[in-house]
Image (cartoon, rainbow, N blue to C red):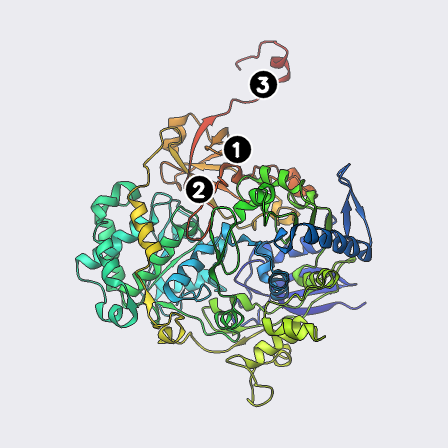
């Protein structure tokens, strides 16, 4: 079989860098960056290149597996046998407990497959169960909740116009490692450096001097205090008459109320809490207001505290108040080839608070409920208790708080089915593990991310190789299960109607329909040069659809009936008032724990790559030298890290990149699944330290509290030698 070169793009993170796959004898032997990709231009990170390790991993699941509940052992079965038994058990559960007894958890990698995402949501919509959960409640749900309150749609999210801005304020974002999140910006390092080279500034607000902060201006803020900092900046804009009152009057309602609330948070009153001197806050606000074109952007670090929705609301409000929202160089709203906010609105899927969780009464965000509640939803009796459960591309035992409780709850289910290509810490408890494809084995068009591209762009990729073993695409598996129980698995109501009439839509037909009827579509041949699936196949490196994102669109895009941006919302006002009641430091837990991303990791699923794990990688706790001395810790030693929810033992790395009083630990470690390299790497599950109690979740989006957790540290004495263990003296030398 001859060697082939096939163009595709990476689907590990949101940069979607162009890649070229080398295929020899039916095996992907190499991945290299695509030099002809219009945006990434021959750049890619180590994870994309190392995807060959995942594709060809001997630990990969490539045949359906059934678990013997008595022994815990996994045995290979046929697809027909697996689907028939799953269907029978699912029908029995629904008959006994109702359709609301079925739940689904959809992990982060699933968002990078348009067919997977649409068919999971379609299955749950067709079934009529509210128990739809995603990784967003550990990541970004409050960003979408804030958009729902501000603009009337959770799917309408501004991004920083990196190409044209002269001042970028980034809060809790580290794109030198993440490559951008809710921001699709290939070569993001270059885009950020370009801002400085054209005379602008980049300011990074973070408790840690991150890989990004080292290259730009760094404001060290205490964890989980972003809301106080941003309100103080807004206060300065009001006090010093720097707000763009004309824009606010034209585009918003409720500014007067928010202006009054902000006045009560002067920087002099918040400096002790945030750790940012009042003079610095005032100057930062003046610089933001005085910039020609300014953008404000926040990501994971700003989302995972106790006030994440309020923080996202305030980030956008600072752009509004300085006249930089929907303006070139400010915060802009993408107009992609397939507009997700418009599709979601037409399908009735752009929901916030349409349903509420059975426990805690949390609102849904884009249909998803808080995943931190999964264990309780499985063990709390009553109508709507989860009795049958699916996970796809997800590992909530590691990614959610209190994974031990979830593991225990999974064992009590009537049925648990996983769609994945690894045995992980969660699905090792599954009755069935059904092998799914990697992104090299399926077609894709990144519908969910098109509106986040800093340069309007669209790319489609066919599969570059046939699925390994008996692996199947998730949408195919979902369709098989749906047929077994008589469900029409389509998110769009019109497609469910057609399905009842005998027409079964495929992902390719659906994406072609969306492309051809979208802004850049060919209107089924009526527009010469327009987009279609066929047209994109002729341009495998992708198509730039416009040189930059158009502005002046916000009042046409806002979904509120008055077409105004709403700044006065009772729930957000209540959050501002709640800031006044938050307790100060707890002497039992004097430090604050933050997470961090690693360049050679992606959440919990890439620790089995030998290329990425080489060099004896560890999961150290980063701590400031003053704190290390205060608590008796040494670089290279071990520490016991404790919170009110749990404790772990970790190696220590003493570094002045940390703000004093703050410690950082990477997430995604602590493996006990079917992946040998990952298991051997050791490490701990950081989310043991997080709380799954409903009272500890962020109230407006149900987000887990994962950033700023109160903790304490203690040194761990070295393990005694063998001779010491039996009572023999140990030489001090």
Q: Is residue 250 left or right of residue 461?
A: left
Q: Are marks 3 and 2 in contact (CB under 8 Å)?
A: no
Residue to which mark 1 is pinned: 650
Q: CA distance from mark 1 to mark 2?
A: 25 Å
Q: In the rendered structure, which disc, 3 or 2, sits on the residue that comes first in sequence?
A: 2
Height in image: 419 above or below 725? below
Residue to which mark 2 is pinned: 696
Q: Is residue 229 left or right of residue 599?
A: left
Q: Residue at x 49, y 29 (%)?
A: 639
Is disc 2 placed on a helix, strand or loop? helix
Is disc 1 placed on a helix, strand or loop? strand
Is disc 3 placed on a helix, strand or loop? loop
Measuring from the top left, give residue 663's x and y in whole percent: 43, 38
Q: Is residue 567 left or right of residue 452?
A: left
Nearer the observer, disc 1 or disc 3?
1
Q: Are marks 1 and 3 in contact (CB under 8 Å)?
A: no
Q: Residues within 10 Å of mark 3 (few under 14, many from 20)?
A: few
Quadrant of the rendering where the N terminus is positioned: bottom right
Height in image: 344 above or below 576? below
Measuring from the top left, give residue 34's x and y in whole percent: 59, 67
Q: Nearer the viewer, residue 351 or 704?
A: 351
Residue to which mark 3 is pinned: 720
Q: Is residue 663 left or right of residue 280?
A: right
């Amino acid at each position: 079989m001859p060697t082939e070169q096939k163009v595709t793009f990476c689907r590990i993170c949101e940069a979607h860098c162009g890649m070229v796959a080398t295929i020899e004898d039916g095996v992907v032997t190499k991945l290299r960056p695509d030099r002809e990709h219009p945006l990434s231009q021959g750049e890619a990170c180590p994870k994309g290149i190392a995807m060959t390790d995942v594709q060809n991993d001997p630990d990969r699941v490539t045949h359906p597996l059934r678990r013997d509940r008595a022994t815990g052992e996994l045995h290979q079965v046929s697809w027909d046998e697996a689907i028939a038994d799953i269907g029978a058990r699912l029908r029995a559960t629904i008959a006994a407990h109702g359709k609301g007894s079925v739940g689904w958890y959809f992990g982060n990698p699933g968002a990078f497959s348009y067919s997977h995402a649409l068919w999971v949501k379609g299955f749950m919509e067709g079934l009529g169960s509210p128990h739809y959960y995603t990784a967003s409640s550990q990541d970004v749900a409050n960003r979408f909740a804030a958009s729902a309150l501000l603009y009337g749609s959770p799917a309408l999210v501004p991004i920083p116009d990196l190409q044209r801005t002269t001042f970028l304020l980034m809060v809790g974002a580290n794109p030198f490692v993440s490559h951008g999140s809710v921001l699709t910006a290939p070569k993001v390092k270059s885009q950020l450096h370009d801002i400085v080279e054209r005379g602008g500034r980049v300011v990074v607000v973070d408790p840690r001097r991150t890989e990004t902060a080292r290259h730009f201006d760094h404001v060290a803020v205490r964890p989980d205090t972003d809301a106080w900092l941003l309100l103080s900046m807004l206060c300065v804009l009001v006090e010093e008459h720097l707000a763009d009152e004309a824009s606010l009057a034209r585009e918003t309602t409720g500014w007067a109320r928010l202006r009054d609330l902000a006045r009560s948070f002067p920087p002099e009153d918040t400096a002790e809490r945030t750790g940012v001197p009042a003079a610095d806050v005032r100057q930062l606000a003046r610089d933001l207001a005085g910039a020609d074109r300014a953008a404000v952007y926040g990501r994971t670090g700003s989302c995972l505290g106790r006030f994440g929705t309020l923080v996202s609301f305030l980030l956008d409000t600072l752009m509004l108040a300085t006249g930089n929202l929907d303006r070139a160089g400010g915060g802009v709203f993408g107009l992609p080839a397939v507009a997700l906010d418009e599709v979601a609105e037409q399908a009735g899927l752009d929901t916030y608070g349409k349903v509420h969780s059975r426990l805690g009464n949390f609102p849904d965000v884009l249909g998803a409920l808080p995943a931190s509640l999964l264990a309780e939803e499985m063990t709390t009796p009553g109508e709507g208790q989860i009795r049958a459960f699916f996970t796809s591309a997800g590992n909530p035992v590691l990614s959610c708080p209190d994974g031990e409780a979830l593991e225990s709850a999974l064992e009590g289910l009537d049925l648990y089915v996983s769609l994945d290509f690894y045995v992980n810490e969660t699905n090792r408890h599954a009755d069935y593990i059904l092998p799914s494809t990697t992104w090299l084995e399926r077609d894709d068009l990144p519908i969910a991310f098109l509106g986040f591209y800093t340069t309007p762009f669209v790319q489609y990729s066919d599969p570059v190789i046939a699925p390994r073993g008996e692996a199947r695409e998730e949408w195919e598996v979902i369709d098989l299960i749906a047929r077994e129980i008589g469900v029409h698995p389509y998110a769009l109501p019109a497609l469910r109607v057609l399905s009842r009439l005998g027409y079964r839509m495929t992902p390719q037909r659906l994406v072609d329909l969306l492309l051809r009827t979208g802004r850049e579509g060919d209107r089924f041949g009526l527009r010469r040069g327009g987009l279609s699936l066929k047209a994109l196949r002729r341009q495998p490196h992708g198509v730039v659809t416009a040189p930059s994102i158009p502005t002046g669109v916000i009042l046409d895009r806002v979904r509120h009936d008055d077409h105004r941006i709403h700044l006065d919302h009772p729930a957000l006002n209540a959050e501002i008032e709640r800031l006044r009641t938050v307790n100060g430091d707890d002497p039992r837990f004097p430090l604050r724990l933050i997470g961090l991303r690693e360049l050679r990791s992606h959440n919990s699923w890439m620790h089995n790559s030998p290329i990425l794990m080489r060099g004896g990688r560890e999961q150290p706790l980063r701590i400031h030298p003053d704190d290390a001395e205060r608590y008796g810790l040494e670089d290279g030693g071990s520490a016991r890290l404790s919170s009110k929810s749990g404790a772990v033992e970790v190696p220590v790395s003493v570094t002045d990149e940390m703000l004093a009083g703050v410690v950082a630990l990477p997430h995604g470690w602590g493996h006990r699944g079917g992946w040998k390299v990952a298991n051997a790497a050791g490490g701990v599950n950081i989310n043991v330290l997080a709380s799954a109690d409903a009272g500890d979740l962020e109230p407006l989006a149900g987000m887990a509290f994962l950033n700023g957790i109160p903790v304490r540290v203690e040194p761990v004495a070295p393990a005694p030698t063998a001779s010491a263990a039996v009572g023999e003296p140990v030489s001090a030398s």
